[in-house]
Amino acid sequence: MNALTAPSLAPLQSVLSPAGPAAAGIASVSWMLFVGAAIIFAGVMGLLAWAVARRSARPVQPMRWILGGGVVFPLAVLATLFVYSHWRTPGWLVQPPPGALIVGITAHMWWWEVRYRDPASGQDITLANELHLPLGRPVWLGLNSPDVIHSFWVPALAGKVDMVPGRVNHLLVEASEAGVYRGQCAEFCGEQHARMALHVVARPPAEFDAWLAAQARPAAAPAGPDAPLLALGRQAFVAQRCNACHTVRGVAGEGRLGPDLTHVGSRLYLGAGTLRNQEGAMAQWVAHTQAVKPGARMPSSSDMDAATLQALAAWLEQLQ
Ligand code: CUA
């Protein structure tokens, strides 16, 4: 955990706490629907009470009620709602607006691959399960999936967009308030659909640039008083064949089946929102993957000896 990503966080996942313009539109439409429906419900109940209680012998005029309450009133309400929601919903864009940051997100069973373009080198930077955004800048997300249909949903930022194999869907998001927001796969995609969370970290542009530059760097060589232990951990990463599925840039492995681990120590969570990335979590995840997240594509390494596990976890934890 580094200083940048260590706010005392209770990540928000609520449609009613918007942190960007697209989500603000959805929240205002939701409130209008809720308040409007409550008023209409109260009105209908009032009319019902009046009809039951009224003593007058004067007959009601059915046609007036049917036309007024059944045709004119619903038409007026629905037309108003249509205009209002159309006005509050962001327009559909075919291309990213000028100045937008472009980020690729690929949904896997059951984690998120996040790809940035390094402005310095032009190379791709591959990350997992975390999306960092600069405040106040539009971000154009390209969303796809190689396996089944998933759905990208960060309620504080925008509505849902399906991630469909064989096509790239787009979503324009913008964060106007700094914070950490939780997102969740919103389309049932198999056994661990529920544990397919994504965290969004929105921060000022200068902090974002520093973060991206740090993520672009390869893993640092083991140093400091723990260097022998860390070197052992780094060896174990190769000896245990972790690199068959994972990459740590600057060390070993071109594995693309699992998340890139070059800076795994800097992430808020492990296993796509499953475990808070704190002391002991890495060893627990590596040794008991199938107990923590049954069905995950990574096997439990429960037969690894304690010293190797400790060294491997220590090395992974310091990959900041
Ligand atoms: Cu991915 Cu549900």
Image (cartoon, rainbow, N blue to C red):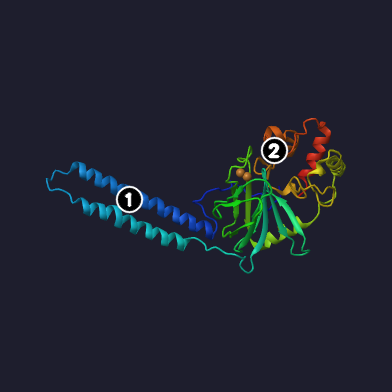
Where is residue 320 shown, x and y percent of the image? Answer: 76, 50
The amino acid beneath tag 1 is Ile
Residue hosting label 2: 296
| Residue drawn at the location 22% of the way across and 54% of the way down | 64
Where is residue 318 shown, x and y percent of the image? Answer: 78, 46
Q: Is residue 150 above or below residue 171?
A: above
Instruction: Dividing the image into four quarters, tell me where ligand 1 lies.
Output: top right
Evaluate if marks 1 and 2 touch, with contact meaning CB atoms under 8 Å apart.
no
| Residue drawn at the location 62% of the way across and 41% of the way down | 193
Q: Nearer the viewer, residue 64 or 212?
A: 64
The amino acid beneath tag 2 is Ala
| Residue drawn at the location 49% of the way across and 55% of the way down | 26
Indicate if the residue with disc 2 has its beta carbon within 8 Å of ligand 1.
no
Q: Residues within 10 Å of mark 2 (few under 14, many from 20)?
A: some
Q: Nearer the viewer, residue 124 or 148?
A: 148
Q: Secondary structure at mark 2?
A: loop
Where is residue 299 shown, x and y percent of the image? Answer: 75, 35
**Distance from the alpha carbon under mark 1 to that under mark 2:** 48 Å
- Is 84 on the left-hand or right-hand side of 199? left
Residue hosting label 1: 40
